[in-house]
Amino acid sequence: MIYFIYLLFILSIFLSIFEKKIGYALSAITSIIFVYYGITIGNIYGYFFIISGLVWLFSSIFSIFYDTYGRWLSPLFITSILGMAIALTARTYIEFLAGWEIMTIPAYAIIGLNRKLDSPAFIFMGFGELSTILIFAGFIYAYTTSNSFYFTALDTYIPLIVVTFGFMIKMGIFPFLVTEWLPIAHGNSPANASAILSATMTLVAAYGIVKMMLLSPDIPILGYILMGIGGFSIFFSALYAYISEHVKGLLAFSTIENNGAILSAIGVYMTYPTKTIAEFALDVIVTFAFAHSIAKTGLFMISGTVEGEALSKLKIIRNKLGEIGGILLASSMSGLLPNIGGVATWSLLESLFMEAYILHSTLSSISIITGSVIAMGEGFASAAMIKFISYTQVFKGITGKSAKITIFSIIGFVILILGSLSYLLFRNFIYGVPSLGIPNGFIIISEYSSGKIFGDISPFYVLILIVVFSLLTLGIFGKPKVRKTNTWNNGIKPREEYTAFAFANNIRLMLSKLLRTEIKGDSLETSTNIFWKVMYYIAKKYVSFSRRLARSYMNSSISWYIIYMILAFILITILVVIL
Amino acid sequence: MDIGSWGEIYMNWFLKGLKKGIKTEKFPKTNPIDIAPWSTELNGSGNVNCPTKAIDNESWNSERCIYCRRCYPLYSPTGNIDIFKVNKKNNIFRRSFYVYPIDIGTCGGCNLELKLISSPQYDMTRFGIFFTNTPRHADALIIMGIMTEGMKEPLLNAYEAMPEPKLIIALGVCAISGGILGTGSQIKPDVIIPGCPPNPYTILKALIEAKGDKE
Amino acid sequence: MRRLIGQLGKFCLYSDTYFEGTCPHIENEEIANSPYGAFNFTYGPSAGGLFESVGIDINTFGEYIRNIKVNPNYKKREIRILDKSIEDAILYIERINAAFSASHVISFLSAIDKISESDIDSDVLNLRILQIEMERIRNNLFVIERLAESAGFQVPLYQLQYLIENVNRKIGKLFGHRYFFGVNSVRKININDPKVDFTGIEREFKTIYEDIIENRIFIDRLQGNGIIKDERSIGPAARAAGFYYDARIEDEFLPYKDFDFKISTYNSADAFGRLIVRSEEIFESLRIISQIKVKSKEYKIKVNDGEGIGRVESPSGDSAYFVKVNNGKVVNIDLLSPSSINIELFSKSMVKNIFTDFPFNWESFGIWISEVGVRFI
């Protein structure tokens, strides 16, 4: 069946060269088939297929209305999707790498052709190839130890370590811990491509880590490292998202933040103190992937609906449906119930705190600190989402209808429904308290070993209660009496507009050392590159040190070289004698 | 600074406050203690050349008097502070009366005297009178000063921003009749407090009556 | 040492002389308009935190103040004073600004006295000094109270209000009116009850003063806030920056040199310095007042035609009037109010601070809009 799907994608690529809309429509249909394929597979990887299929479905439909670019966008778009599909369904290392490259190169082309700016595309390619090298190296090692090209169980964890760092690069996290390359790349491509880049390309990377992790033996130390890195990147990328003024850059930093969360969940799995926590962690990974990918697709669609890129100067068309849809998406990304984002955030924090509780040693400090840092980061993430949605859909702009708005609003409702369906993702962690009126199957619990409950939530009941209380209030007090009146603004007509820049400026001033805030005569600038600066500084120092070292011993003096030769001779003789 | 000395400082304020004692006067239950004479009712007889025509036909009109003392000694102050008029009041404000002062063209005197009714000697809050920072939360609008061009629009906006029920209070002769410098406020007041500037005792008593408190 | 004060009608006024013409203008560096993200924040004219109606436009990135424009013309009043007799003119001058009423009237009368023939009795001049110093005490207490109010510093706030009301009552008892209305005329100074005693004020203020400057949180909000060290500053703002500028020792007309007092200066040109200067001035003013004997006085004066300039040190700086008299009527009059200069200084000093610094800095200058927005017709 999977080859049938590949064929359909290739057909859509050809069709889209001639007629974009038909090509997109066919790729949407193929995505539905892919979703069905994921449902029938039945294992954990099926969830990844379902998520990707849904994302491709929505972005293809959106592209029908959105694509006003040249003839190059649609074939490259669908080719990248094909690559991702190949990578997800690969059974051998070679198929995976093929899919990986087929996914990356069209994306590089899209970024390069979009702007005629070379540097974002080159940066993207550079980091992309770096990740490919690491993955390739890991796979080679796995082949040499298992003697097979197929993905099979391994008895060494070295491939896992190498490929994890390779995949982390693609998630925007390593090697420089929240670099700007991902926001630059995702921010400089058309909205539909940004959606699949952020939502599914990073998902394929997470899929890769999970796949190798399930086939490799345990290595808890890597888990702690991933937890730490994940927590750290959540905090910083959420902060950078909050102060960002670029409508797509903000979302791209949010992508890094969510990938950090997935990484932390992976870390919890690797360090599992009990089997129950490990199972729970897997469910967390899947839930987070669902929540992030689908909501991010919707948000990128919003960024494609508005004109312009600077948050304080956008041209917007909006309507009531768009407001509701946008708020649902933003609240999910902020980690609020009853959306699935709320379930994801809750379960991640639960797993970290459960781990700390069980471990009862100094190692639990790592999970507690990670959990606290994640909570702080979620605060910034909420603020960033509020800023984003306020300045794109809620308060500004001209009212009007648009198909693009309808599409992302539908995604918003899908997110809401998924929240109530999230019980299906936590199949072994379902509970009920019939005495309180909640029948079995409607509470998700976090357990750290069988029978020992840590915490619980019920997203469906939150939704029900919100609806019931609203209707109750409406019934008792009737429709609210609304009186329109003029704004009181110190007695004169309101003239000014509070810009998105000013919204986040208090943080730019408070954390000025961290953000390197500089106030010049006509601008206020921050830098999200302090990690770059630190690494660059270390690299420069290393280069100058090695130059001095090299000059000192390679000093073109014959006598020293003779001494080196004699030393080498003595050393080799000793080694031969010992061995 | 350690906890000990922090505690000392706060105890300092507290103890000092206790040592100072209660400074609030029992007015209006008792008579006013210290009144500047040229802010009270004038009485006398004879013809004088009053610059604002406050003395007409041997009767003194409080709504026009700017206390220039040119009628002295034919007319002299009596010490009676009850020179205000409450044409409309509302009992709903008896327990809580929020006022919003708006300055449409004062010399600063009415602003200062109004502010001083919150000083410990008068203590307006014991009657439930408070200042608010926005007309949207205000029960009464206190208009001070002559009507100036630039403040016409803000005055109307403030009036419209206030919810019903509301009271309009004209504080000072400038707002009532324009005094010597101009014309009074455009909006017809419900409560009139004359003076140039009015004495805090007068202001306090007028506000107490406007909000429906009986003696 | 000569210093430049400001523009008084068609003259440029210096500390010891005046020239016809415009004062040398300092070029203001133009700040680029509206960079990305900046917007104009409106404060006023009618807002709870402002004591009078004034429109303030703050150009900001959000929290950070790039530029301030003060518009004092919302409550601009036209004073119909031309062609009125001097006695009638006094009625108007008193009511330009009630808080500085004594300073305004006495500087006007100083201008009139300069074009008249007669010696003014030293008792009358002492009474004038008494009025100005009492006004200074009340106004400086008011500025400190506004600073405490901005900081939410409730206990000293009410203690200071108590003091202000006390001082007002003493002024009311001594002169019959709390803001010196109807006190000064060309021929006499009206006294209501000469037995008024100011001795309790010093002790009470001393305790409040020493306590508030020990409070680290309070002085933290004032230090480093609104720094301005400008040779063309006046009043407490100049003295806080270390400049020894004071009309009381520069203008010979009022006999300050007969009294034992000193000019208070400080060495930090910020809001804290202005607080210290004003507080020290209260003590010095109380010292001057204790040296004056109060008794009602009438005097003879013959006003000629001519023109003259009178200048006094009002609580916020130099206040000057140029008056031209013809046939006993005022035909031309100009005012140099301290607030007009202080507004410029304030706008310059506010740049690079943040929003929360605004109320402290504004109050520390002691600006009264009612004396800026006046036009004589």
Image (cartoon, helix red, strand yellow):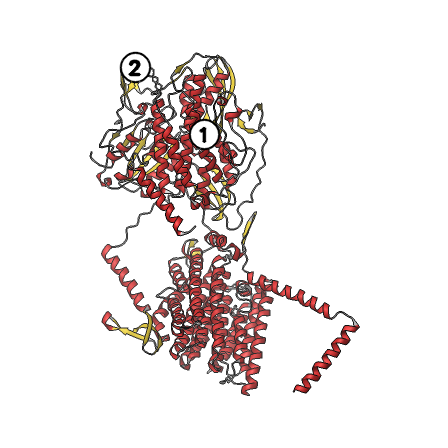
Query: Which three-letter amino acid code belongs to the residue tagged 1?
Result: Glu
Q: Which mark is residue B134?
A: none
Which chain hosts label 2?
Answer: B
Q: Nearer the viewer, residue C316 or A437?
A: C316
- Residue A37: in sight, yes or no? yes
Horizontal and vertical percent position of residue A98: 56, 79
Farthest residue toward the right?
A558
In the displayed structure, B92 sits above or below C83; it is: below
Which residue matches tag 2?
A: B74
Q: Could you tell me which quadrant the N terminus of chain C lies in? A: top right
- Residue A492: in sight, yes or no? no
In the displayed structure, A148 sits above or below C78; it is: below
Query: Which three-letter amino acid code belongs to the residue tagged 2?
Result: Leu
Farthest residue toward the left?
B214
In the displayed structure, A284 sits above or below A315; it is: below
Q: Is residue A208 left or right of residue B24?
A: right
Horizontal and vertical percent position of residue B156: 35, 37
Q: Please tell me whether mark 2 sits on a helix, a strand or a loop.
A: loop
Horizontal and vertical percent position of residue A533: 58, 61
Q: Nearer the viewer, residue A538 or C95?
A: A538
Q: Please tell me whether mark 1 sits on a helix, a strand or a loop.
A: helix
Q: Local crowd at mark 2 within 10 Å, few (<14), some, or many (≥20)?
A: some
Report which quarter residue A577 is drawn in. Answer: bottom right
Q: How many marks?
A: 2
Q: Nearer the viewer, mark 2 or mark 1?
A: 1
Which residue matches tag 1?
A: C284
Is there a contact, CB below 8 Å, between mark 2 and mark 1?
no
Q: Nearer the viewer, residue A97 or A56?
A: A97
- For the residues beneath circles 2 and 1, the answer to whether they share a chain is no
